[in-house]
Amino acid sequence: MRRPADMHTHVRRGSMLQLVAPMTAKRFAMAIIMPNTNPPITTARMARTYRDEILKTTRCYTWEFEPLMTLYLTDKLNPRSVTELIRGVKYYPRGLTTNSDSGVQNPASLWTKNTGPHSVLRACADKGKVLMLHAADGFAREHAMVDGSTYMPGEELDPYHQEPHFIRNTLPRIREAHPDLKISVEHLSTMSGVNYMREHGGPTLGCSITAQHLLLDRRDVHRGGLRPHTFWWPIIQKKEDRQAIRELAAGNHDFVWLGSDSAPHPISKKETDCCSGGVLTAHAGIELYAQAFEDMGALDDRFERFASINGPNFFNVKPSKQTIGLVRRAWRVESMFITDDGESPTIHPFMLGEEIRWKLQR
Ligand code: NCD
Ligand code: ZN
């Protein structure tokens, strides 16, 4: 297949970056690099430094790998920071996911004139850059009904309702205020999201889908106990939601693409009182998708378009001309990963101890 593109990944910094960036570079021709580092990437200069850091660890490879840089949308982000180098801006609802404390305080500022976020979105629209959405609301703005639950204005939403609420109440307002802006809903996880995409997906609206949302439903998360290494934001939903996501992914739509949301954390952040969202998948970044597409009976041209063509096209980047091979040979995710700094954080990868049916050909 054509060398795929990972349109959503977290490579972190320092020793974690050294460990995980090569995993992505071995499989993908390019990756959208998420900006929720500590501190977050909020200027073009920071993005350039970050890009250099990534290229330093990946340029030893002969095959191509291009980090596609993004900015973290804060209330104070300067629209002039959206330079040529920047492919898009990522919206984080404050407090709703890992490293989101600098996120936009009030989602309404996305569509309210004379606010910082509104002016950044205008700059993005003018320059053809993409707004990437962590499509979740924490609170109901108005009286709302979501999947049978009723919310009073200002009431905290159930975590399973964060995305449906955003899709129905927040996304339409953003689109209305910025009709020319390209918007990508990241890691789509619900049937509500799928229905919205089927109706509105097209040249200015698309979505990325993770392997975990294709492979898991919430029975897997709770089987025999709570399994922290299946916990991401957005959380894994019901089997009906997974089925809807699968049908969308296999549906050959050019507004649907691969975004792994590989998000490594040291085990101390996972096996603890308040487990952080995010799990490493980059160690099998394309193999997991091959497995899911095989399960879906869609391991054909549709897989290549989803994995290698649609994402780059939406972001105005040329799809790769190189190829990779995948062989159907089962292998086991044998062990944890250890970074090589003094503190040696240990990372528990997704599917540790389990078999993956597809292997990257070398
Ligand atoms: C991500 C992380 O760890 O940075 N975690 C996650 O659960 N997906 C943050 C994010 O993408 O929301
Ligand atoms: Zn993410």
Image: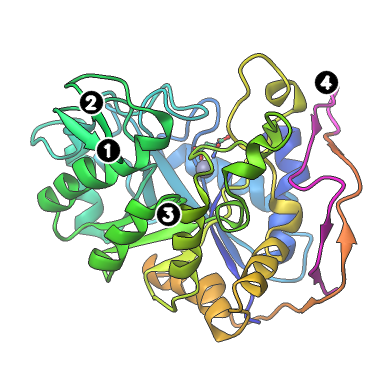
**Looking at the image, is mark 2 or mark 3 earlier in the sequence?**
3
Quadrant, the C terminus: bottom right
Which residue is tagged 4?
Answer: 343
In three-dimensional space, the C-alpha distance between marks 1 and 3, rounded to whole angstroms, equals: 39 Å
Left or right: where 21 falls relative to 211: right
Residue type at the position of mark 2: Tyr
* CB atoms of marks 4 and 1 within 8 Å: no
* CB atoms of marks 2 and 1 within 8 Å: yes
Closer mark to the observer between disc 3 and disc 4: 4
Helix, strand or loop under label 2: strand
Whole-percent x and y of residue 265?
Answer: 69, 32
* Residue 93 inside the magenta-drawn segment: no
Nearer-the-camera pick, 134 or 80: 134
Q: Which span is picked out in magenta?
A: 340-362
Closer mark to the observer between disc 1 and disc 3: 1
Find residue 228 and report its image quarter.
Answer: top right
Residue 11 visible in the current orientation: no
Task: Identify whether 252 is placed above or below 140.
Answer: below
In three-dimensional space, the C-alpha distance between marks 2 and 4, rounded to whole angstroms, equals: 45 Å
Is label 4's Cβ within 8 Å of ligand 1?
no
Which residue is tagged 2?
Answer: 151
| Residue at 76%, 34% in the rendered image | 15
**Number of residues whose C-alpha sits closer than 10 Å to that of mark 2, classed few (under 14), some (14–19) or many (20 or more):** some
Nearer-the-camera pick, 61 or 228: 228
In three-dimensional space, the C-alpha distance between marks 2 and 3, rounded to whole angstroms, equals: 42 Å
Closer mark to the observer between disc 2 and disc 4: 2
Whole-percent x and y of residue 255?
Answer: 37, 69
